[in-house]
Amino acid sequence: MGTNYSQRVAAYRKYLQDTDASLAMCMTDVKGDRGLHPSKQKDHQDYYLHIVDENKDGIVIRGAKAHISFAAACHELMVLPCRAMTEDDKDYAVSCGVPLNAKGVTIISTPPEIPHAQKGSFDFPLGGGLGGDAIIVFDDVFVPNERVFLKKEWRFAVMQTYMFSNFHRMTADAYKYPIIQKFVGCAMLIAEYNGIERYGHVRDKISWLVKYAETTEALGRLACELCVSEADSDLVYPKPMLSNLAKLYFAENSMESIQHMMDLAGGIMATMPREKDFKNPVTGPMLQKYLRGKAEVPTEYRVKAINLAKALCGEFEQIASLNAEGSMASQRLQIYGTAPFQEWKELAKKMAGIPIDKKK
Amino acid sequence: MGTNYSQRVAAYRKYLQDTDASLAMCMTDVKGDRGLHPSKQKDHQDYYLHIVDENKDGIVIRGAKAHISFAAACHELMVLPCRAMTEDDKDYAVSCGVPLNAKGVTIISTPPEIPHAQKGSFDFPLGGGLGGDAIIVFDDVFVPNERVFLKKEWRFAVMQTYMFSNFHRMTADAYKYPIIQKFVGCAMLIAEYNGIERYGHVRDKISWLVKYAETTEALGRLACELCVSEADSDLVYPKPMLSNLAKLYFAENSMESIQHMMDLAGGIMATMPREKDFKNPVTGPMLQKYLRGKAEVPTEYRVKAINLAKALCGEFEQIASLNAEGSMASQRLQIYGTAPFQEWKELAKKMAGIPIDKKK
Amino acid sequence: MGTNYSQRVAAYRKYLQDTDASLAMCMTDVKGDRGLHPSKQKDHQDYYLHIVDENKDGIVIRGAKAHISFAAACHELMVLPCRAMTEDDKDYAVSCGVPLNAKGVTIISTPPEIPHAQKGSFDFPLGGGLGGDAIIVFDDVFVPNERVFLKKEWRFAVMQTYMFSNFHRMTADAYKYPIIQKFVGCAMLIAEYNGIERYGHVRDKISWLVKYAETTEALGRLACELCVSEADSDLVYPKPMLSNLAKLYFAENSMESIQHMMDLAGGIMATMPREKDFKNPVTGPMLQKYLRGKAEVPTEYRVKAINLAKALCGEFEQIASLNAEGSMASQRLQIYGTAPFQEWKELAKKMAGIPIDKKK
Amino acid sequence: MGTNYSQRVAAYRKYLQDTDASLAMCMTDVKGDRGLHPSKQKDHQDYYLHIVDENKDGIVIRGAKAHISFAAACHELMVLPCRAMTEDDKDYAVSCGVPLNAKGVTIISTPPEIPHAQKGSFDFPLGGGLGGDAIIVFDDVFVPNERVFLKKEWRFAVMQTYMFSNFHRMTADAYKYPIIQKFVGCAMLIAEYNGIERYGHVRDKISWLVKYAETTEALGRLACELCVSEADSDLVYPKPMLSNLAKLYFAENSMESIQHMMDLAGGIMATMPREKDFKNPVTGPMLQKYLRGKAEVPTEYRVKAINLAKALCGEFEQIASLNAEGSMASQRLQIYGTAPFQEWKELAKKMAGIPIDKKK
């Protein structure tokens, strides 16, 4: 890139460190008609964030970025492109750092699904759904040159998207394994509390869940063990094939993990009475008596484990497993794009007795 | 059965018709330790509803039935066993009709998941989750003889469970098809509103959903077309193999249907702003501008379709698809139990050149 | 169609009946580059059968049809198009009846996979693989007018393909159910002979196989029960949605059925000694002693059941399950094409609170 | 173990090295009734190999081991137990080294499936199926003490089975990846030769195959990267959880890999004409003309690629993928047995608000 972007990046990085600023990555545009390129959208041209003006001091950007987790709690917004750009779309090839309180920035955050549900409560041990994801609108925000890291160099847009995704998929894997550990632990508790842990079909389901946990962890871990170092740079990143495999693996299997939990816990996951019923002097003792599983386990343990299972299987969590850190389609695309087909085709040709000819 | 149960049943049926009473079927016991038989439970013997006393006028029952939908809105509770009973468990072989207001009956109903969510609202078009499922406690309830339809004839317990399940699985299929029709319709709307309906992978997902709808319907319909008539009786019931296949089919595939919807709709299903953000004079116009998909479709249509998708994929609905009308294991058991293995083994023997010998 | 095709068809049908002729349907063209239309193929224009000449008495056709089962044993070849045609491809819109011994017809049949394997033999109870499928080359074959049923009326090509597929998928389903019955019977025999039929995971696999058999049968049967009558015609055909669902169901699940069989039978399916080892005076008694399963079943029964399992899981059978009577993609396409999306979208709109507007 | 087994093992290992002997591992017994323990078998007690006599110089063993690949080409047979033994079964707890030409050893090897098929031939590029797997009968074979490594110490039987399986599953993974590379290369060649490589559903299938290859490799590789060192020993072995995951992963997904290949290649995989048809002066030129795919690729390339696909999808290969190196059930069992449930349950309890109590 012509401009000395490296110096700008280094300075910005130093600024972040000096101020201990937290950063939200703003990649996903709102996209409008998914069948049309950024500059070919019909009713307006702002479905992908773009440069609408520039002068010698900086640029002006307009657009909206979606699904930005906890944006309202960050100091800085790092804007970057979410796809490859063509020359026609060069105004959309932009990355830059924007302070949260910049003029023209509006944060629209979602509330939790069940606002009154408190984290740690009996009924909703994880609270009322995550909340805090934001659509961030950039309404003609001025960004000074020293905070601009890509400006219309459209060929490089895809590289930023791609490199970000390598890390992003890795982070997905990194937070997912600890969740699945608890998920499997919870499933095992419920099986034991229900007195069914020794049955073959139950062990099969638990064994499936262990496989889910350990394969997720293994793929992510190997992505780091075999990390890639960029020549002439201090950039080190997870092996792209593996970080994509890791994310895709847990996404593709997440619904089955939930099915197993629901199968092990049973319908009571949906029809569990609430804390007030347990505290009610008439119904409380009844529920204490009847909702026990195995005799030696207090009723409350079983109820809490089932309430945790319900929280862990929540719809928000499901959608995030599938779509956060990129759709499954985006991972499939990168897996396809990263495979050494030429080499594998030659191995097959040798075996089949077909002459090695690079073109055919 | 020795007692003239047929007459009692006929009289009770007439009573129900004359009074236009609605009836809740109360089958599933709370079960305690799932690894132990009803009479072998450890801390108390009431995990399965049973007869604790009797005199010349009737019986006294104790226990609790779970997952009884809309019990509080019914007039009569029809109690029946939820499993095969052995002779040791004969006190648990009981079925009878109990008025909702009988002395000793307590109904503990669940509230909706999100109590403040109104059906038809912008954010929650189907309301805040179903609610209304109850645990019903029978605390030494007296039932007069004329309302007792099974009393310790333990060999017949399984027949009642079995026959109920034939109908119950059929009803599951009957209400599921109309839901899936709307589910597929909603998926198609979202695909169109997002401008992706012509892509191959989208058509594949929609095609999968059509298959899901039509196979569910076909199996249930054929269960009725090939219904079974009980000799010497006016009983006609859905073909058991097919009603079980129908329920199992939609249960086993329900999580994949949800995955496809979440894949088509994307992360916005989890991070959609709420009605108040759309009505807010600052953020409303921003969301109108940025959350549109295809140019010719109003933003509101797209948002409503996505909010409907979210409601249709709700956790309650998922658990119900898997576990209502019996777990998948119970359907697999009946499918296994209904198969003509002797005939099929003989066909295989003929083909393999093995002598036909009924024992080997 | 302008020409009086109905009369020609009736006459041809009468001829077939009078001569008791058997007919092979010749639909699938060899296709060349699957990414190009019939008339856009590069190195020659004959990858799809087409009309290369015509005079007042008839037409001359050239091309090749593939996968024609038992063609060499038939009397007549019924040629029809395998896809929708555009106006550019109108020479490819042709259907006609050709006697097997017409000048210019060459039949190239495949031998069985293992030519020396005899049907009914100990090692290969079903023989050495089916064989008999042919590529039929039509090298400028003259067809007189009275045997031509479609001649360049390109808009009608797709209708012939479509109507043939409705029947063809139904026939697939009709022959598949009896095979699966034997398949399940064989799996059950092996489970019993190995002494494992009472284990939970074995019952689950057998139960899966029963489901596979009965769902295949149910979908095909309902396609017939709900058959469609063409107005003003004596044409009655299986309901297209259901005949496609039936074929797709058994194709999509065929590999899992085979996996279950291989899992139940174990590695011996691949390493079973041959008849000559059993007849050998040294090794025969050893194998009799050691290859027994359950004590009360003769070794020979077990060996024969496993050899049958191997034959039923043969590669030819697998490829046929997937690809005969049309690829899975072709069924998905028709399922998609047959769905009442307009109706389902309106149901969804009503539920979501979106105005009913046919266009959006 | 009382006897100085370590010295014996070291001496035997030296012997193997000095003589450059190749060794076949003989683990799987023929098993008889799978529902009965070794010493509880009914018609004879030899279904599991056992010690039938002993004197001061050594032991005498009887039994049969199955599925021993290429036994006839080895010098030494290493016998070891295939399961955990109880005290009742202590005679079955035996491991020892037996020369192939020991008195009483009989090798019964299977021939290839299609004996006349030559490796490297046009029709069967990989030859006629593997062949060479043997049942080895030990008919009262004497083994001198210095070659006996386990003698009735029944508690240690399971450790030998377990440790062997760690390595065995790793070797499975090690040979599978190079096969899958060729498999994917072959699928890609066929897609390109057919002119369909750019279609979405084709890329999805190829992408699935890449995932299959790379996940198989990753899990096996990490098993080695995180290998376990036995304290006070020179034993280093692959991490058991990961070597089991690796084997299970490729087994569970092997049938889907084959389905994708069959779907990409189409019915011609089953109906391909043979070499003699290509060499025949009449039919050869016809096949050259009609079996081409993309214009720029010689027909022969396409035919050879499809014949290779068929060979790679062969039934022997399928059964081996599922059952060689242990059934899927055995891997699931070890995955279950290796999981840190106590730790995971405590994580779940913390989250659910359940007191940490090791017993409940």
Image (cartoon, coloured by chain):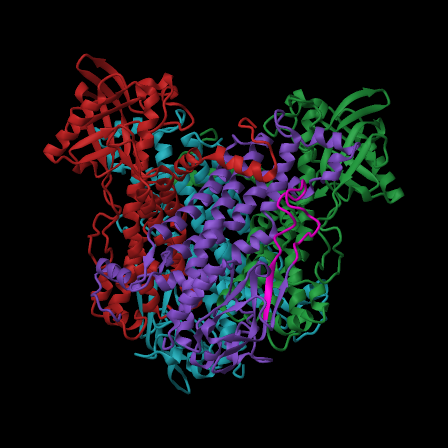
Chain colours: A red, B cyan, C green, D purple
Inspect the magenta stretch and tell me whether residue D134 lies in it: yes
Dividing the picture into quadrants, the one containing residue D263 is top right
Identify the residue shown where x is 28% and y is 66%.
A302
- Please identify the residue farthest to the left as the structure is shown: A18
Image quadrant for the C terminus of chain D?
bottom left
- Please identify the residue farthest to the right as the structure is shown: C18
The one nearer the camera, C75 or D272, is: D272
Magenta-drawn stretch, dominant element (helix, strand or loop): loop
x, y percentage for residue B292? 35, 29
Residue A28, relative to residue C261: is it above or below?
above
Inspect the magenta stretch and tell me whether residue D123 lies in it: yes
The one nearer the camera, B323 or C75, is: C75
**Residue B25 seen:** no
Over which residues does the magenta segment extend?
A: D111-137
The one nearer the camera, D43 or B135, is: D43
x, y percentage for residue A206? 38, 61
